[in-house]
Structure formats: C-alpha cells, structure tokens
Image (cartoon, rainbow, N blue to C red):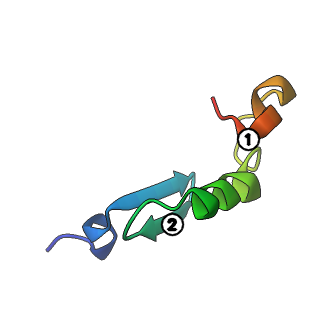
C-alpha cells in the first residue's frame, strides 16, 4: 500500500520534516524553507541564504 504522503501534488522536505500540499503555494513553501533553513547537519552560507535562496 502506497504511503498517504505520496498522494499529494507537492511534498517539501527538510531532513526529518515534511509538508504536503495539494497544489504549490509559494507562501507556504517559503515559510517552510525559512523555518527549517540551517537546522540540519549542513550549514548554508549566508551569501546563499540572502533573499530566501537555497543551495
């Protein structure tokens, strides 16, 4: 049986955190990124983080 999370249109992950959406939502994805950026074992340089950018 397939996992419920894979039935979503969009799945955003940050290590152990997952957010599923029925459709892409720029504001929700941006909030998710800002909440979890630099919370994992890797560190993202400030020059990459500026403006909400990711690696």
Mark 2: which secondary structure? Answer: strand
Residue 52: numbered disc:
1
Residue at 32% from the left image edge and 68% from the top image edge: 8
**Which numbered disc, 1 or 2, marks the residue that appears first in the sequence?**
2
Q: Secondary structure at mark 1?
A: helix
Above or below, comparing residue 28 to residue 51 in the picture: below
Mark 1 Cα within 10 Å, few/some/many (few <14, many 20+)?
Answer: few
| Residue drawn at (37%, 70%) of the image | 22
- Residue 37 placement, left or right of 28: right
Q: Quarter of the image containing the N terminus?
A: bottom left
Which mark lies nearer to you, 1 or 2? Answer: 1
For this orientation, the residue located farthest to the left is 1
Residue at figure coordinates x 71%, y 55% from the top left:
36
Residue 29 position, x and y percent, is 58, 57
CB atoms at circles 1 and 2 under 8 Å apart? no
Give the vertical position of 49 relative to 30 (above or below). Answer: above
- The location of residue 38, given as percent across then percent down, is 77, 44
Residue 35 versus residue 1 in the image, above or below: above
Give the number of callouts: 2
> Which is nearer the eye, 17 or 7?
7
| x then y, percent, for residue 53 | 69, 35
In the image shown, does 23 or 33 lie closer to the viewer?
23
Would residue 7 appear left or right of 50 to someone viewing this image?
left
Q: Quarter of the image holding residue 27?
A: bottom right
Quarter of the view holding residue 31: bottom right
Determine crowd level at label 2: few under 14, some 14-19, many 20+ residues with C-alpha closer than 10 A.
some
Q: Which residue is mark 2?
A: 19
User: Image check: 15 left or right of 9?
Assistant: right
């Amino acid at each position: 049986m397939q996992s419920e999370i894979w039935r979503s249109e969009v799945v955003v992950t940050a290590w152990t955190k997952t957010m599923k959406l029925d459709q892409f939502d720029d504001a929700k994805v941006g909030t998710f990124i800002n909440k979890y950026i630099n919370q994992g074992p890797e560190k993202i340089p400030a020059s990459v983080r500026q403006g909400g950018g990711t690696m």
